[in-house]
Structure formats: C-alpha cells, structure tokens
Amino acid sequence: MSVKVIKTPDIVISVLYILGIVSVGLWAGLKGRRKRPAAGSATDGSPATSSSDYFLAGKTLKWPMIGLALFATNISCLHLVSLAQSGFDTGLLSGNFEWMASFTLILLALFFAPFYIRSGVSTLPDFLERRYNRACRDWLTFVSILSAIIIHIAFSLLTGGIVLQTLFGIDMYTSVTVIAIITAVYTIIGGLRAVVVTESIQTIVLVAGAVVITAACFTRMGGWHSMVAVLQDTRQMNKLSMLRPHGDSSGLPCYAVLLGYPVIGIWYWCADQTIVQRILGAKDEDHARVGPLFCGFIKILPVFIFIVPGLFAYTLAQKGLLDIQALQTTDAAGHTVTNSKGIYTLMITQLVPTGLVGIIVAALLSGLMSQVSGALNSISTLVSFDLYRRVKPDASERQLVKTGRIAAGAALVLSISLLPLLNSYESIFTGINEIISHIAPPITCVFVLGVFWKKASARAAQYTLLIGSFLGAGVFTLNKIYTSTPLAQISFMMVAVYLFLICLLMQIILSYVYPVQHTKESAVLFWRSPLEPLQHRGWKGLGNYKTLSVLLLLVMGTLYWIFR
C-alpha cells in the first residue's frame, strides 16, 4: 500500500496533541501530589506521594470521569482499526462485543462495584485473598499482570504500529517505542489521576476522529439507504444483522454470543484490575455505580462510528468508489483475496482531506496511549500491593510508588518484545477475543461464586483457578497445533462456555469436598441474596443507578430488536 504524504497541518496537529496530553498528564499528577502530601514527606521538603493517591487517585474520582476512563481504557487504536476490518468482512456482527458490554456494565454497577467499595480493597487479588486465600491472590496477580501486558498493551501497540507505518512510512517498532515512552512518562510520574484525566480527554478526541471517518464514508456513499441498496444488490443483507443463525459462516451464531459473552465480559469488566481500578478510585458508592452505567451508554457508539465505516467501505468498494486493489493478492489457487487488515488506513488515505488526517492520527494516538497508560498503572498497582508489599510489609509509601514505576517500565519493555509473535494473527480483534476466551472462565467462576455463594470455599477456588487456567491454556495450545480436529472447529465463544461450565462444576463439587471455613473477614465478603446490593437507595431522580440501569436495558433491547 502506498504511503500517504504527510502535510504540514497534519504534522502540527499530531505533535501539538502529543505535547498537550503529556502536559495535562503531568499537571494532573503533580497537582494531586501537591494537594495531598503524604505522611513522611521527603527530607528536602517536597511532599511524598502516598500509595493511595498514586494508585487510586486518593479515591476522589466522580462518575463522569470514571465512565469516560472506563471507555477509554477499553477502546484503543486496536478497536478503530480491527472493528473497521470486521465491518468490512462480516458487517455488524462484531458489534455484539460492544453492545453486550452494556449488559455486563449493568452487572458491574448493581452487584460488583458496591461490593468492592464496601470491602475497601485496593486490588482485586486483595479481594480474593480476603474472600478465599493467599494462593488465589497470587495466581490472579500473575494472570492479571500477564493479561495486561498481552491484551491491553502489546495488542494495542501492534495495531498502532501497523497503522503509523502504513500511513507515514515510519518503522513500526520505532513509532511504537517512541509513543510508548511518551505515554509512560506521564503515567509513571502522575499515577492513576494522570491516567484518568488524560483518558477523559482522549475519549473525546478518539470519538471525534471516528466521527470524521464515519462522516467521510457516509458522504462518499450518499447515505445509509444507498449502502442498503448495494447490500441488497450483492445479496449481503445479513451484514446488517447482529444476531446470526446456527451454521452462519462467521462461526458466531447468536447463541454463542449470548452464552459466551457473559463469561468473558464478567472477567473483563468486573474482575480485571485494569478496568476495575477506576471503580476502586471512586469517591463513593454512587459514583462507583453510575460511572459504569455512563460507560454503558457510551458503548452504544462504537457500532456506529467504528464498525459502520467498515461496512460503508465494503459498499464503496462494490460501487468502485474506494480502490482496494492495494489490499488484494492472489492465493495459490489463483483467486483474488482481499486482506482487509489495512482497510482503515485505506479509508484515511482516500477519503479524508489534508488537515483532518491530523485529527484521525490524534484519535489513533488517543486510543493507543489511553490503553497503554491504564494498563501500566494497573500493573504497577498489582506489583506494589500484591507482590512487593508481601516481601517487605514495612515498605514505605515512597518505596511502594518507586516499585510500581519500575514495574511499569519493565512491563512496557516486555510488551514491545512480544509484537513479532502477536503480529501473526490475521484478524487482531478475533485474536484478542480468542485469547480472552481461554483466560476468563476460571476467573469469572471464582468471582461469581465468591460474591454470590456463601459456601464457596478457599481450597475449591484455589484448585479451580489453577486447573481451569491450565485447562484453558492446554485447549488453546492444542487448537493451534491440531487445527483440523472437531475441538478446533468449535467457536471460541462456545469454548469459553464449556470451560466455564467445567470450572463451575469443579468449584461446586470441591466446595463440598473441602467445606468452607470462613474467617472473620471472609464471613462478610459475599451478598446474602441478589437483592441485598439493591437496597441502597442511591441518588434521587434520573441519576439513580436503578433508573439508569432500567433505561440502559430498554435502550439496548430496542437496538437489538432493530438490528436483529
């Protein structure tokens, strides 16, 4: 694919954006440090940074910032690129991964967020130790750090590097390293407050860039009805359907989505440190509940501004209004094959005028930097609270923060080193969800039973985490080695369901084999009934978490009915 010549306005916009984000991040982090001098200030008179302030923003986050930060941490450059590819290939189908998240965010707001706030935990592994035992905490810490490095950082860096290389001719590893270091500067210095403040800005910029691409595609196509007419002519109307029947060529029938997404969604949104850390930094329980619901409403947007542009690109190509020849190759049988991985870049080069390209680049950088910064902060929190403080229980606040910063730097280096391995996936979005489907089941199981079932025992949870994780890794490895077996042909979403059911059965049986022996602390770390967390009245009016939950359910139900 040809490289787009960078015009001066685009360079200026991109550079100013990077400088602005770094400045805001440093300002936010250092401002918070000045406002909350920790006990045991530095001998030179400068205030030390408390671990609570650095890792949890001093528990001062309000719902708008939480909601925007959750969205920004979830959405990255990967989504802009890979969801456009999915829209080109399969239409709206991948939108299920966006819209189903809203239902999981309701679960987070109603049941998990208030639980975490009331328990006073600093990390989710900390919760597992209080609810179960130390072995569970250690294993979740290991899995959380590993998943943050691979899923949240490495995949995002890979996608950003591919796009920047294609657009501007910059070597992928050079561009990724520079952006990663810039992001690490304000993240490592400023902590969670810097991350959340910059993520709020980056969310707005990211959405603005996506809207620019959507508008460009919409204008060139001549509107929604023109696109539908092309789909009718090419007998591709199923591309407008979110729910596909059994046997659909995509391999994602509706039952696989409806059954499989809760397994991966509860882990990702309710039990993953990178996401939940924004909740742990909430000012109070109401802000911790309303923030995720606000994010749930924002999650409606990606289908229309990330996936629909890819669908527009498909119809534009059918009408000859988008030249995709640069993406086409010939396979061994002599058939023309389209590698749609570069479709987003192609849309930028052919549909967006000079000047606006700078906004698109800023949006790509927003998604990349917000994902990396959020994951780095979570990794530093896990290493400091769950590993270092155990080895040195008398560690000072300054030592905890210093250790977290070193851990973030090391994680960044490891993530960059993984890029060549991860680049082998044909579809990055499918690759990331396939990995999650094998990681999530045991973690989802022990959290759900731990929060809702009094009899879930520590030994049972420990064995479920270990055996379930090795089972998932084994299935993943076998499917990659023996690609033609019946097991390898099962949808990765259904694999998640089967693994979850095995883990669920395992933990229930083991909880009776090794009966629970509650400590004074664990005896209060579960809901005695599903209605208990709903007894909190919350704010009055439209801002009430119950009202917002019902409204979000109605909106999502309506959307699914329209695009069924």
Image (cartoon, rainbow, N blue to C red):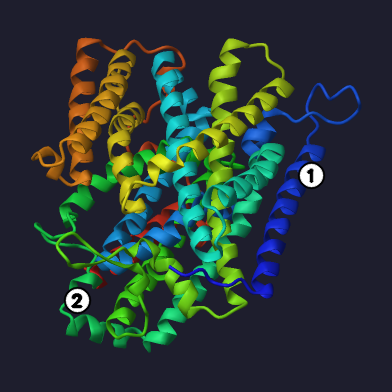
Give x and y (percent) for residue 34: 82, 39
Residue that appears at 26% across and 20% down: 467
Give x and y (percent) for residue 318: 27, 81
| Label 1: how many Cα within 10 Å (few below 14, some 14–19, many 20+) | some
Q: On the rendered image, what quadrant is the C terminus found in?
A: bottom left
Marks 1/2: CA distance? 53 Å
Vertical order, 187 against 447 (above or below): below
The answer to whether residue 428 is seen in the rendering is yes
Vertical order, 271 against 175 (above or below): above
Residue that appears at 58% across and 55% down: 64
Q: Do callouts 1 and 2 mark residues in contact (Cβ within 8 Å)?
A: no
The answer to whether residue 133 is seen in the rendering is no
The residue most toward the right is 44
Q: What residue type is labelled 1?
A: Lys
- Counting every numbered tag in the picture gives 2
| Label 2: how many Cα within 10 Å (few below 14, some 14–19, many 20+) | some
Residue designated by label 1: 31
Vertical order, 515 against 554 (above or below): above
Answer with the quarter of the image where residue 272 lies.
top left
| 437 lies left or right of 406 | left
Residue designated by label 2: 237
Q: Which mark is residue 449?
A: none
What kind of element bears circle 1?
helix
Query: Of the residues under marks 1 and 2, which one precedes in the sequence?
Result: 1
Residue that appears at 59% across and 17% down: 388
Q: Which is closer to the viewer, label 1 or label 2? A: 2
Q: Nearer the viewer, residue 522 or 248?
A: 248
Give x and y (percent) for residue 3: 51, 68
| 360 lies left or right of 261 | right
What kind of element bears circle 2?
helix
Vertical order, 193 against 314 (above or below): above
Q: Which amino acid does label 2 sit on?
A: Met
